[in-house]
Image: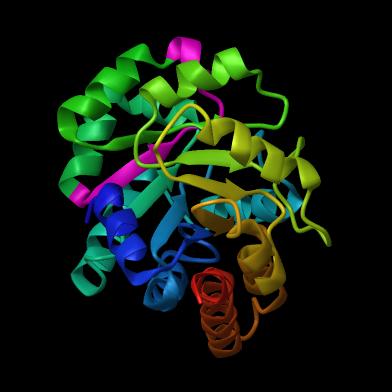
């Protein structure tokens, strides 16, 4: 399913998007497949991280997950296979890759995007690819119908936001605060301000990630944004249950189910 179709479906249901992030291959290919199946049950869009040795945008939790996945033999080729497997069970949940540019560069931009299309990947996020250097990848993504999703930070000036939304598709990923990924107790005030700034220049859905780690955060951000992205808080469950696979999977499923509820409550209250 395309990302645009998912947002249209959610709008008709009166819901915002819940987007869950998980590192492919953590702590093994088999366990990550099972975890992602549980995640797909309650998520509107699933973001799968292709593990990389130098994930500059990620905090310690996701860095450690990348190391576990790489040590277990995870590769970009296996990431495509993972999406193919998931699409057999959950074809109506768009899958998005979060990958660093070096992985795309090594495979070749066109080959990477072509494989995304063949595997059923709906979009890609490349945190270390600046908008000024994205022309080639943008054209290839348009050719194959794969969304290229860009990040906007609180420090991004308006002129740069305009350039980003011109090339972006699927949704715009707003980074809630300056810094790296990770759980936080409170949602940054600047997140809401950044969402409002981005919405001045585009009709694309605007979703917020980095630091969203509980249902209350999801409810709060969904008052202004079109969706909430949760990553580190899910990956943390893996880390703390490495010796108990069943407990890990149950905790992930329960947590994701609870977070999804946060995309309904406030909007429905507002409507009523």
| Residue at position x 56%, y 57% in the image | 228
- Up/down of 201 relative to 234, above or below: above
**Nearest the eye: 234 or 265:** 265
Taking the view exactly as shown, the residue that stands out farthest to the right is: 185
The percent coordinates of residue 162 (x first, y second) are: 49, 18
Residue 64 vs residue 225: left or right? Answer: right
| Residue 104 position by quadrant | top left
| Residue at position x 42%, y 42% in the image | 171
One can see residue 62 in this view: yes
Residue 52 on the magenta span: no
| Residue at position x 64%, y 76% in the image | 242
**Nearest the eye: 263 or 37:** 263
- Up/down of 158 relative to 119, above or below: above
The percent coordinates of residue 214 (x first, y second) are: 70, 70
- Up/down of 255 relative to 169, above or below: below
Image quarter in which the N terminus is found: bottom left
What is the magenta range?
119-133
One can see residue 110 in this view: no
- Up/down of 47 relative to 240, above or below: above
The percent coordinates of residue 92 (x first, y second) are: 24, 66
Residue 253 vs residue 79: left or right? Answer: right
| Residue at position x 16%, y 26% in the image | 143
The percent coordinates of residue 36 (x first, y second) are: 42, 69
């Amino acid at each position: 399913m395309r990302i645009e179709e998912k947002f249209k479906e959610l709008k008709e249901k009166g819901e915002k998007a819940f987007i869950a992030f998980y590192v492919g291959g953590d702590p093994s290919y088999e366990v990550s497949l099972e975890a992602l199946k549980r995640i797909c049950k309650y998520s509107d869009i699933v973001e799968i991280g292709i593990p990389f040795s130098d994930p500059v945008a990620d905090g310690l939790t996701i860095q450690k997950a990348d190391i576990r996945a790489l040590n277990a033999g995870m590769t970009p080729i296996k990431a495509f296979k993972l999406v193919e497997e998931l699409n057999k069970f959950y074809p109506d949940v768009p899958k998005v890759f979060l990958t660093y540019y070096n992985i795309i560069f090594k495979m070749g931009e066109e080959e990477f995007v072509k494989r995304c299309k063949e595997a059923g990947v709906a979009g890609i996020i490349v945190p270390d690819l600046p908008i000024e250097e994205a022309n080639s990848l943008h054209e290839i993504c348009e050719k194959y119908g794969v969304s290229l999703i860009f990040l906007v930070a609180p420090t991004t000036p308006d002129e740069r936001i305009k350039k980003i939304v011109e090339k972006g598709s699927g949704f715009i990923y707003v980074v809630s605060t300056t810094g790296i990924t990770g759980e936080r107790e409170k949602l940054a005030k600047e997140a809401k301000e950044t969402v409002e700034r981005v919405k001045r220049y585009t009709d694309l859905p605007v979703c917020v990630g980095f630091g969203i780690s509980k249902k209350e955060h999801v409810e709060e951000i969904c008052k202004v944004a079109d969706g909430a992205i949760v990553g580190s808080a899910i990956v943390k469950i893996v880390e703390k249950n490495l010796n108990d696979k069943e407990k890990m999977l149950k905790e992930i499923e329960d947590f994701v189910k609870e977070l999804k509820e946060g995309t309904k409550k406030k909007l429905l209250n507002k409507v009523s």
